[in-house]
Image (cartoon, rainbow, N blue to C red):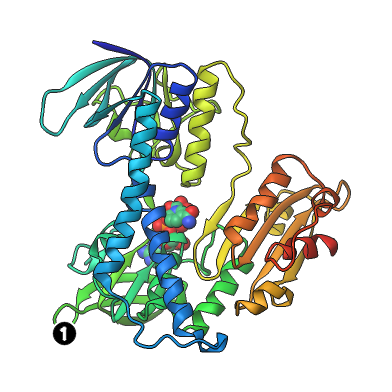
Amino acid sequence: MERYDLVVIGAGPGGYEAALEAAGLGLRTALIERRQLGGTCLNRGCIPTKALAHAAGLYAELSACGRFGLSAEQLRCDPAALAAYRQSTVETLRGGIALRLKQKKVDLFQGSGLVTAPHRVRVEPPQGGALELEAQNILVAAGAKPAVPPIPGAQLPGVMTSDELLEWGGPPFGTLLVIGGGVIGVEFASIYAALGSRVVILEALDGLLANLDRELGQSLKLLFKKRGVQVHTGARVEALEPAGEKGRLCCRYTEKGVPAECGADAVLLAVGRTPCGLGAFAPGVAPASEKGRLLVNSAFATSLPGVYAIGDAIGGAQLAHLATAQGLAVVRALAGKAPGLRLDVVPACVYTEPEIASVGLSADEAKARGLAVQSKKYPMSANGRSVLTGQERGFIKVVYDPAGRAVLGAQLMCARATDLVGEFGLAIANGLTVEQMAAAIRPHPTFSEGISEVLRSC
Ligand code: NAD
């Protein structure tokens, strides 16, 4: 039986980065994956959706390029070429991961990994011929899968989760109905609206992006409205049914108690993701869990000795970069090193047009915690780069401690928000004050000048 210092189950950004780090720190490491390298993020999540978002953004920009003195006649979306671009992006990145694993001498096993006892993992390859591995430590990074809500009709043809919608690769729909106004729902709404679909969002809560600062969801709702995306909040979906016309669907729902219905050519279910960690354990050996998520302590240890779990499998914020950071922290601790990362400062990014990003506390969260904070907002309509590139309304908001002046949080909705948020993450992770952040000269003309402006107003 092969013996390893660390066996990692799941090769998403949590698992493969942990395996690379472990091998780099001198641990003999195995990585087990039943599907493709890269996990949800690379194959069915962040990367293919952001590739689509990039193409959709270009399409929308070129469609309206007359304002820049340009004309793009006969602009059209070729669904097959779009799918090929998306796929080649994924494959390039997948090849890069395979190369890094090989260079670091991580042993990669194709198949399902199953913890059969403490320190024991069985690999079950698709072609049969299971093998047993002995592991000093085991890291479960098994991810999550799209949740399918118990709505009558959720299994009808044309009703898809994000996995199936990405696979679909057909032309933009006539009407796409999106159930769920969280991150996945609004990202796909933004993409399909830009590609010319009619989009309707039904969200059960009273706002979009309910986990983020209220103003972000409110501003996005206004922008969507301007683009013809219908947003219904406080909407309870009752049932999905086939409609009269072939292939059409009808969704019955109540909006603030009033019955309503909506026709659609396709329906996206974007109502959250279910953790997969328990599937990595043989019956009878599963560690403590709650609603399918593995329970861990502050060191990511499960209740089973020598077994750790990270990422979507443990619930919380289901973000690729957080899973990576958690995996690095576990591996560094196993090698006797400090984590070297602030696991409590986690940027959240939404790849709509314009982008949305947030890190640290919002003013409402700070108040709920009894903290006396101040927040300042800078409208990006006053930023030169935003004006010259024809951006829509947007802002950068900073939350800070008025006494000690420490930066505590930021919320952004503007071009490149997902990159700009890194400056605030850096400041919060290192306890910088407003003045320390403001000391840096930011180049002109850039979107980042908006950061200098908001800090100047504090
Ligand atoms: P989510 O939890 O962010 O949002 C789901 C939304 O669906 C909620 O607002 C909920 O109120 C609503 N909902 C649930 N049941 C409903 C119903 N029957 N009718 C109407 N609305 C209903 O989940 P998600 O958007 O599916 O995303 C899943 C996870 O993946 C999240 O943790 C998200 O952060 C992560 N993710 C992140 C990114 C990113 O970082 N850019 C991108 C995609 C996904």
Residue 20 in picture, x, y percent from top left: 43, 28
Q: At 48% across and 83% down in the image, what residue appears?
A: 227
Q: Which residue is mark 1?
A: 244
Q: Tell me the kind of residue under disc 1.
A: Gly
Residue drawn at x 32%, y 34% as measured from the top left: 278
Left or right of 206? Residue 274 is: left
Residue, far right: 403
In the picture shown, does residue 351 fall above or below 56? Answer: above
- Is the distance from the Cβ of mark 1 to the nearest ligand 1 atom less than 8 Å? no
Name the residue at 50% across, 18% down.
334
Q: Position of residue 451 (x, y in %)?
A: 74, 61
Q: Residue furthest front?
A: 70
Location of the C terminus (image quadrant): bottom right
Residue at screen point 26% across, 26% down:
114
Residue 363 in the figure: left or right of residue 303? right
* Residue 85 image point, x, y percent: 32, 61
Location of residue 376 by image quarter: bottom right
Residue 103 drawn at (x, y percent): 38, 27
Q: Is residue 78 left or right of residue 131?
A: right
Which of 182 and 256 lies nearest the eye of the viewer? Answer: 182
Indicate the quadrant where residue 363 lies.
Answer: bottom right
Looking at the rendered structure, the secondary structure element under dot 1 is loop
Let me know if residue 323 appears in the view. yes
Q: Is residue 189 above or below residue 127?
A: below
